[in-house]
Image (cartoon, rainbow, N blue to C red):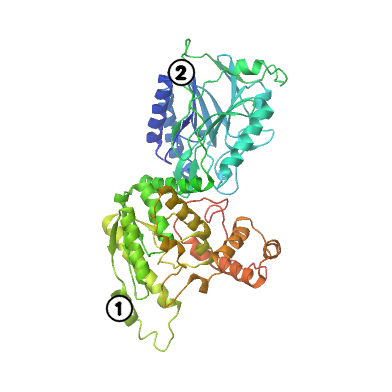
Amino acid sequence: MAQMNSTVGDLWGNAEKISNFISRAKELQADLVTFPELVICGYPPEDLLLKSHFVRDNLKALNTVISSTKDITAVVGFVDKDEQGQIFNAAAIINNKELKGVYHKMELPNYGVFDEKRYFQRGKEFFLFKLGNVSFGVSICEDIWKDKGAANLEAESGAKLLINLSASPYHAGKRRVREKLLIKRAKETDSFICYTNLVGGQDELVFDGGSLVIDSEGEIIACGKQFQEDFVIADLDIDLILKSKPNFKRKAGVKSVISFPRNIAKKSTLAKEQSLKRLTPLEEIYSALVLGTRDYVSKNGFQKVVIGLSGGIDSSLTAVIACDALGKDNIIGVSMPSYYSSEATKSDTRILSENLGIRLIVIPINAIFKVYLMALEKEFAGLRRDVTEENLQARIRGNILMALSNKFGYLVLTTGNKSEISCGYCTLYGDMAGGFNILKDVPKTLVYKLSKFRNKKEGRELIPDSIIIREPSAELRPDQKDKDTLPPYSILDPILKSYIEENKSYEEIITEGKLDPDLTKKVIQMIDRNEYKRRQSCPGIKITPKAFGKDRRMPITNRYREF
């Protein structure tokens, strides 16, 4: 299984990478090599699929892959097109430089981040393939999630090996759900399952790999690394094992059987890769953030990033993740103290930068802020200072970061977390200004857990402990604290999870969570009225079951209220 990191739209680069994996498989004398879903074009290609020339070029790229399959069988994901111009999410079954068959995905997901019915037609038939004396079936991602779906039908028709090409995006807990489902499917079909999953970052999505080979008893006999490209090797004696289990009834024949010979007469035994230690939940989330950051930056042609460092927990964790993703030499921190910045946060910013070994630029904003106030003095005469002056400071900082971005080609990483963005506790064109937000889907309570996790892993304080224990503050007015505007994060985050990720009503939240009704109402009102801000925010990495963006599509103009 070639657990590959493909790039959306890089048809020829992806094809070359596929061919290189095929060459490696041939060197190992493998009979069969499998690839992820839509690996030729990358996943998800979205509205690129509406361009007929994109689909045409993807087919040309497939032909270059076909030419590299001398003496081996490969199963490769691509976009197929029929004579009427309809397109399909497809798998090419290739043997010895010949396209032997094409399978079209039958179950098109249209929920959460998926939008496949917008583009693809549904497949209507499955095939049975015979490689030597081993019968196998092919399905794509969602097909194997459906009870009594294509995989079951293929097994009943004689398939002993079920190959599934997948591009299953990550969120916390997804691996366990996925493995449970595949083990169940292997047992009920009495078949081996070869599940090849995509790995890599694509905009806000991260694909975590973790490809699996599962035997008919539901035992995992090979697995791919999580959040890394991998080449998973398994040597299967399918007939020998299944001969001892005569009870599963497979039909004698099926209408569409495509046979081809094994290309290797004498085979040495393939080396077996040991099952790997699974990552803990926090390790998984952290790895997803690192991979998503690395791929977003590199695949979009950037090398260096710039981050506004405030001495707070969010910007500190952002800087640490960016260092792990890109290397310390590619991170530029910028401290922009104002009248209200404390000596403690300024000191902690310096210590963090030294701990990470990154460059720190210090640009005080007092003089710029004074000029803004002077320019607005006439219009603001007689009015009290309020959030306007606070936001001016945030926007000055945003301007400075964007100026550095323009001048030096840096990508600006914003630092807001999911809790703040949910409630609108952020400034448009200020701290929201930038190209990518690592923590966009990370609740504040999880920010603290990840910071402690990373320090523990390092064996020292990468993030100074004083940052972790300090009460959070935006430092935009004297003695300001987050709690002046927001409930404590330990109370806020469960409300956000219930309302945003679980779609629970106000009544359900206060009843099930035994929460204060007025406080819950206030939080829901903040979430609802700040949709316009979230719509204008930069992309960030999805790590929860429902992230802002593709997952949650609420209208900005919306008068529906529960109370």
Instruction: Report x, y in % for residue 515.
Output: 66, 67
Above or below, 388 against 219 in this view is below
Q: Residue at x 36, y 62 (%)?
A: 309
Instruction: Report x, y in % for residue 552.
Output: 57, 55
Above or below, 80 against 470 in this view is above
Residue 340 visible here: yes
Residue 300 visible here: no
Q: Which mark is residue 100?
A: none
Quarter of the rendering occupied by the C terminus: bottom right
Secondary structure type for disc 1: helix
Q: Comparing marks 1 and 2, which lies closer to the viewer? A: 1
Q: Which mark is residue 371?
A: 1
Name the foreground residue: 67 vs 358. Answer: 358
Q: Type of residue at label 2?
A: Asn
Q: Which residue is mark 2?
A: 96
Instruction: Report x, y in % for residue 276.
Output: 50, 33
> Given the current orientation, which residue lies at the most extreme front position?
459
Instruction: Report x, y in % for residue 391.
Output: 41, 73
> Given the current orientation, which residue lies at the most extreme left position?
407
487 horizontally vs 412: left or right: right
Secondary structure type for disc 2: loop
> Given the current orientation, which residue lies at the most extreme top position?
265
Q: Residues within 10 Å of mark 2 (few under 14, many from 20)?
A: some
Above or below, 187 against 31 in this view is below
State yes or no: discs 1 and 2 in contact (Cβ < 8 Å). no
Q: Type of residue at label 1?
A: Val
Name the foreground residue: 416 vs 255. Answer: 416
Above or below, 358 against 69 in this view is below
